[in-house]
Amino acid sequence: MNTKSYVGKTFVVTNSDARIRDPQDLTKFRRYKAGDNIPLGKHIGDFITIPVMSEIHVTDVRTDPDRKVFVFAEPASGNGAPFGWTNSVNLEGEFLNETTGSSPAEFVLPPQGNNMTVVDAAALIRQGPPSFQSTGTSIPRGTFVVVTQTLDSANGQMARISRARLETGQIVMDGEIGFTKSLNLAAGWSDEYNAVAFSDQKGPNAAWRRGQFIGHKVLVRIVGLRSQLENVTLAGLESYMPLREKLAQEANITLSIESSFRTFAAQVELFRIFQNGGNTAAEPGRSNHQHGQAFDLNTAHAGFDNDPVYKALREHGPSVGFIRTVSGEPWHWEFLPDKAAENGFKMPDVDP
């Protein structure tokens, strides 16, 4: 699972005023001083810049408090000293849609579909169907397991799990445990799942749908609209990338994300603003942005029928599972393949 898509790529600096930033304070710029190797045409006190059309490798990424993205640029040739930190908008394509890491950041074994970590300290072991009655014992938090079966019940989805470990790169099963609620598990094997945040149903990785907690998700950071860093779920990223590629290939459109996964705390704040006269926002736990399928994309907000991004989404979105679901929000699209196949580019009740 590669969640740092920029690694190994070559980028081109297209801004003729691509200034180098102070690594201790990215709001400040570096200037030439006495003793520096000052290029021809530059003087002491001038801003240090990366020559336009330079080919670079990005070796690190940081953000400021406004989530603006800055990259550490090194010459792609490998010759000379590193250039340093610069704004991502100075690069061709502005670093859009590059992924810069994930939460958790490290995995013993990345998500492969059925390898999970127990994240709830009260994850009860349950008997099989139809009752899924509790055995009165729980699974230690942080246990690495493999899901061998999932079944729906009156109390939500249940997962049949076995203990497992990694041996010479292969999953080795260590005996069946029984059933537990699927929401007690998080994708992949990671020791970071022992952090307090992953036991909090209102924590930064907690997903909600229709007022119900549905589990903790792997989040991936991606550079979105206005070169701000956004969060998407791993599953959301896997649905978004084919849409992005489809629009690039079929309509020469660069798609970008304005907003995707939203934390419970962020939704609390948006709902507070709404209650005080701000933009419409759903109650915390009920926003479509809290479960990972919803994306606000870079369509026009007014006159959108003539907007090339919207027209491309309308034409090509349904073929890769995307559909409009909210009236008055042409930027809001969700990955709902069955509904897109049935209804086309928007749900019947969406107006306009």
Image (cartoon, rainbow, N blue to C red):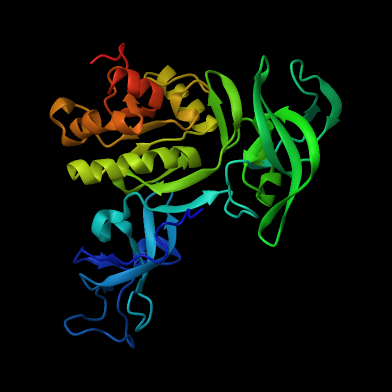
Instruction: Residue 45: give x, y in percent of width and height.
Output: 26, 76
Pick whichever, 336 or 227, lies toward us: 336
**343 vs 259: above or below:** above
Dividing the picture into quadrants, the one containing residue 305 is top left
Residue reaching furthest to the right: 136
- x and y, in percent, of residue 50 in the image: 27, 72
Q: Farthest residue toward the left? A: 306
Q: Please count the marks in the image.
A: 0
- Residue 329 versus residue 322: which sits nearer the camera? 322
Residue at (36, 65) in percent of width and height: 9
Query: On the picture, is 62 further left or further right than 350?
Result: right
Residue 122 visible in image: no
Residue 140 location, x and y as percent? 80, 40
Quadrant position of residue 257? top left
Residue 242 spot, x, y in % from top left: 35, 42
The residue closer to the viewer here, 254 or 321, is: 321
Left of 251 or right of it: where is 140?
right
Q: Nearer the viewer, residue 236 or 164?
A: 164
Residue that lies at the very extreme toward the top in this rendered image: 349
Tell me which corner region of the image, top left, top right, bottom left or bottom right, holds residue 251. Answer: top left
Q: Residue at x 49, y 32 (%)?
A: 266
Residue 152 visible at all: yes
Q: Is residue 192 above or below residue 31?
A: above
- Residue at 63%, 39% (x, y): give it: 186
Q: Classify residue 271 as left or right of residue 46.
A: right
Image quadrant occupied by the C terminus: top left
What's the residue at 34%, 64% (across, down)?
86
